[in-house]
Image: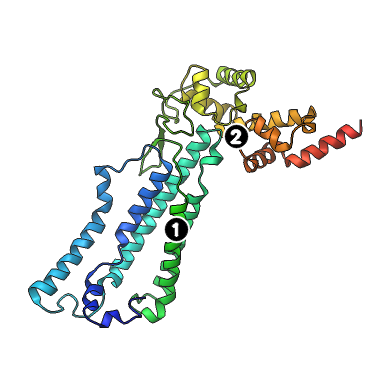
Amino acid sequence: MLGHAGWYSTQPYRDAMFYIPFQQLFFLGPIIYFYTQSLLNQSFRFQKKDLWHLVPGGLYLLYSLVVYITDQWFMGYYYFYADERDKDLATWYQIAGLISMIGYFLVSLRYYFTYKALAYNTLSFAESVLFRWIRNFLSAFLLMQAIRLFFFFFSPEWGDFPQKWWNYFIFSLLFYYVSIAGYSNTIQAALPFQSSLLNGSATLGPFITPLVPEIKTADVQEIAPQSEVDIIPWKKKIEQQIQQEQLFRDPKLSLTDLAQKLDTNTRIISKTINQGFDMNFNDFINFHRVEAVKEAIQEGATQDLTLLGIALDCGFNSKTTFNRAFKKHAGSSPKSFLQAQKRSVGTK
């Protein structure tokens, strides 16, 4: 916009437009990565060891400062800018910046999927803490990179403003969308965990969030199994505990809750459910909730309650989650099941 307004050819704006690095491409990727972590991981804290992510951006700022001091203080004329081309639009910088942003996008995406898998293996209410905004945010960031890739292949001259105006316009729209939507979608992380940047593995940490205030997990161990577990007896213990105490009716039930009930650790419970029942923790609990809903319908509970009322009573915390889980485990929608049950009763 400023380029089209003629600021590049008018002093004193010309030098400001040339020497101030408006495009901080090396900072965008790390910011996206740290932002994703801050939203999803309750235990995330920016530490000194994370500063290395900012080194490329810092070096580019230093390079820009050296260029400015050399031209304006020592040489007294456009030495580095003899070609009168903005350094931000240099091909090497645009390519390096794109590689950096794509790399950090992929790492952020893997971080989200790591969190998602951990949530499904840990919480019976995983759907409510998956945060659709994160998915939309990463999709918008991906679209930004797709647009840049398109121009690299079909119109690589970044200084050609008349041909590139709509690229900058679309980029600005996406940028404002991310800024405004991100501000209005303030969310609270539900899981504290440690994740490896290299292999994507995650280790669950102590819960301190208000979403699960009753959990105390000073002795929580890694979810990934490290030793052999005799699954058969644990399957029986878990099933008995779930059925006898109707634990699935707790909408905030977590893996740690169940482990504490059985006086063991989360590793044993997680491995038994994953391998013994061939489900993750979320699906396992939702399966029992669906069975409870089916039983309530068959007993005529719909005479006093709506389907949603029955679902909430059985531990579901939203209509969307209930419908999705019921169709997955019962093979039909709740309404279809209810209608089939009414027809069955009518024919008797």
Q: How has the structure been colored for display?
A: rainbow
Q: In the rendered image of this protein, does residue 213 appear above or below residue 262?
A: below
Residue appearing at x 82%, y 39% in the figure: 339
Which residue in the protein does label 2 denote? 283
**Residue that protrudes farthest toward the left in the picture:** 74
Circle nearer the viewer, 2 or 1: 1
Relative to 310, 109 lies left or right: left
Which residue in the protein does label 1 denote? 180
Residue 341: horizontal and vertical position, in percent? Answer: 82, 35
Quadrant showing the C terminus: top right
> Residue type at mark 2?
Asp
Q: Quadrant of residue 97?
A: bottom left
> Residue type at mark 1?
Ile
Residue 280 seen by the camera: no
Residue 265: horizontal and vertical position, in percent? Answer: 46, 22
Q: Quadrant of residue 46?
A: top left
Q: Assess disc 1: are there few (<14), some (14-19) or many (≥20) residues with their C-alpha within 10 Å of its C-alpha.
A: few
Quadrant showing the N terminus: bottom left
Q: Which SS class for mark 2?
A: helix
Residue 135: horizontal and vertical position, in percent? Answer: 49, 51
Residue placed most toward the observer, 59 or 197: 59
Residue appearing at x 53%, y 37% in the figure: 120
Relative to 231, 20 lies left or right: left
